[in-house]
Amino acid sequence: MADVKRARVWISGRVQGVYFRQNTQREARRRSLRGWVRNLVDGRVEAAFEGEPGDVEAMVAWCRVGPPEAHVEDVVVEWERAEDSP
């Protein structure tokens, strides 16, 4: 991958108990992204996505909506240096 982008994302709202984490994993895999997603004790979901810039940006946009059962109130994004970057 020549051009790689990485985003770390914190999602708040009704995002636990509605399969947000599982759906996020599925969406990221569908876009061939690397990374992880986890529930936080404060009720938020945290995730990191790395891959082609357009796919990472699309994944961040997906997090702003989430699955139908979720109600996203806020998304905080930090752009980081990709692990594959020189």
Image (cartoon, rainbow, N blue to C red):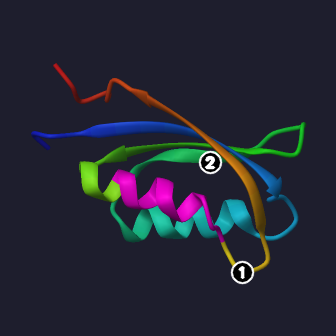
- Residue 57 lies in the magenta-colored region: yes
Q: In percent of the image, x 29 and y 39: which residue is there? A: 5
Which residue lies at the image location 69% right of the left edge and 59% below the top edge? 21
Q: Is residue 70 magenta?
A: no
Write down the region rendered in magenta.
Answer: 56-66
CA–CA distance in space, label 2 to label 1:
18 Å
Q: For this view, does 24 lie left or right of residue 27?
A: right
Q: Which mark is residue 37?
A: 2
Is residue 58 depicted above or below 75 in this figure? below
The residue depicted at 49 percent of the width and 59 percent of the height is: 61
Q: Where is mark 1, residue-wise?
A: 68
Q: Position of residue 46 (x, y in %)?
A: 67, 41
| Rendered image quadrant of residue 70 | bottom right
Q: Is residue 86 above or below residue 48?
A: above
The residue lying furthest to the bottom in this view is 68
Q: Are marks 2 and 1 in contact (CB under 8 Å)?
A: no
Number of marks:
2
Label 2 or label 1, whichever lies nearer to me, is: 1
The local secondary structure at tag 1 comes to: loop
Q: Quadrant of the N terminus?
A: top left
* Sequence-earlier tag: 2 or 1: 2
Residue kind at label 1, given as amino acid type: Pro
Where is residue 71? Give x, y as percent. 79, 66
Q: Which residue: 27% across, 56% down?
A: 54
